[in-house]
Image (cartoon, helix red, strand yellow):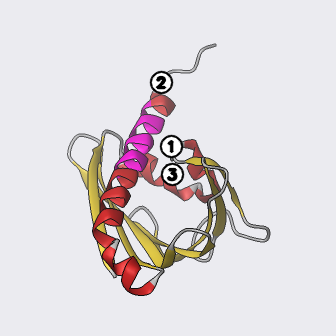
Amino acid sequence: MAKVSVERLIPAPVEQVWASWYAFGDIAKFNPGLKASRLLEGSAASGLGARRHCDMKDDKTFVREEITEYQPEKCMVIKIIDGNMPMKSAHATVTLEPRQGEATMLRFDMEFEPKMGVVGQLMVPMMKGMMRKTIEKILAGNANYLAQQALPQAA
């Protein structure tokens, strides 16, 4: 499996960062590559076994994901269980570590195996670069979303 890892220091406490990821069906609120996201019918709101559907902005691509490992305020593993991306299999591990000054180190590790056999394997270096940029945008989106949540609300 190919692996991509990205870290970002988020200027918010772990509890706030976790709350944004905990709202499993709401990832489109901070993932700039998504048009929409929602929980699948019958899914729990979050936690082990929670499932969601995500529509990409291209109006063609979708994924369905499930939380397969879960440690509150520490980490969750999210596995792609269905979709039309060129992936044979893929999962992401989101890990949070508290840092001094009410900050959180957010680490996003993505492991994937492309479809298309040998051709897919030849595409791994290009896919890793694209995946890294996508993850960087997700983490930046999460930081921006949390910064907006911290702004005082107008009366």
**Residue 15, position as x, y percentages in the image:** 43, 51
**Is residue 134 depicted above or below 113 in this figure?**
above
Q: Label 2 to label 1, Cα distance in Å?
A: 20 Å
Q: Residues within 10 Å of mark 3 (few under 14, many from 20)?
A: few
Q: Label 1 to label 3, Cα distance in Å?
A: 18 Å
Question: Is 114 colored magenta in this rendering?
Answer: no
Residue 120, quarter of the rendered image: bottom left
102 to the left or right of 20: left
Residue 22, quarter of the rendered image: bottom right
Residue type, mark 3 in image: Ala
**Residue 117, position as x, y percentages in the image:** 42, 86
Q: Residues within 10 Å of mark 1 (few under 14, many from 20)?
A: some
Q: Which mark is residue 140?
A: none
Front tag of 1 and 3: 1
The answer to whether the residue labelled 3 contacts the one labelled 2, judged by CB atoms less than 8 Å apart, is: no
Report the residue marked by disc 2: 151
Report the residue marked by disc 1: 32
Front tag of 2 and 1: 1
Q: Label 3 to label 2, Cα distance in Å?
A: 16 Å
Report the residue marked by disc 3: 19
View extreme (left): residue: 100
Residues 92 and 50: in front is 92
Q: Main secondary structure of the magenta part?
A: helix
Question: Is 141 colored magenta in this rendering?
Answer: yes
**Residue 123, position as x, y percentages in the image:** 35, 71
- Of the two numbered discs 2 and 1 on the same chain, state the one appearing first in sequence: 1
The answer to whether the residue labelled 2 contacts the one labelled 1, judged by CB atoms less than 8 Å apart, is: no
What residue span does the magenta drawing correspond to? 136-147
- Of the two numbered discs 1 and 3 on the same chain, state the one appearing first in sequence: 3
